[in-house]
Image (cartoon, rainbow, N blue to C red):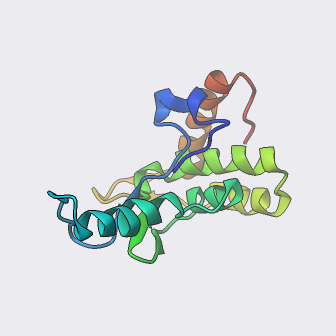
């Protein structure tokens, strides 16, 4: 699920979106036009289309340091892209005028480094500044951190 306003200019960087996945181990792909197809479309794809309520909700999801679970679905939020997601969330929060959300995101940007699954530490603000520069070029306006 992504943002229609800023997603297209950021397509080079994966858009401004969150991938929605099933929390179940796997779902069999329907092979016939029967009740299983109807169930798949309603319970899988249908629910995924409603996972993100609006742009403010997308902002909140992007800025989450942890997996966001809703029903049988979750937003795939790898820790390695957390700094990039924080910059995306900040862009949305500013565009929407969500002052409190902006303050929360700025606090997250100033947090201590995070440990990646490979054991390496990732400096949040340093990485976010690199993403802000890339996003600024793509969007045509400066994303100040």
Indicate the quadrant where residue 60 lies: bottom right
Q: Is residue 90 above or below residue 21?
A: above
- Seen from the viewer's position, the closer of residues 46 and 20 is 46
Q: Is residue 83 left or right of residue 117?
A: right
Q: Is residue 101 left or right of residue 112?
A: right
Could you tell me which quadrant the C terminus lies in? top right
- Seen from the viewer's position, the closer of residues 72 and 118 is 72
The residue shown at (35%, 61%) is 41
Q: Is residue 71 left or right of residue 104?
A: left
Q: Residue furthest bottom?
A: 71
Q: Is residue 67 left or right of residue 117?
A: right
- Return the x and y of residue 76 as percentages of the image width and height: 41, 59
- Return the x and y of residue 18 as percentages of the image width and height: 49, 52
The residue shown at (41%, 51%) is 80
- Return the x and y of residue 115 as percentages of the image width and height: 40, 61
Indicate the quadrant where residue 135 lies: top right
């Amino acid at each position: 699920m992504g943002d229609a306003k800023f997603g297209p200019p950021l397509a080079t960087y994966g858009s401004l979106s969150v991938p929605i996945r099933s929390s179940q181990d796997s779902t069999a792909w329907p092979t016939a036009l029967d009740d299983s197809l109807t169930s798949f479309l309603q319970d899988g794809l249908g629910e995924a289309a409603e996972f993100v309520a609006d742009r403010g909700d997308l902002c909140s999801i992007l800025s989450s340091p942890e997996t966001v679970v809703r029903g049988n679905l979750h937003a795939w939020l790898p820790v390695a892209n957390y700094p990039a997601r924080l910059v995306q969330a900040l862009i949305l929060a500013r565009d929407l005028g969500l002052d409190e959300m902006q303050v929360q995101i700025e606090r997250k940007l100033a947090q201590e480094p995070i440990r990646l699954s490979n054991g390496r530490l990732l400096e949040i603000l340093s990485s976010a500044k690199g993403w802000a520069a890339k996003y600024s070029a793509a969007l045509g306006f400066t994303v100040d951190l």
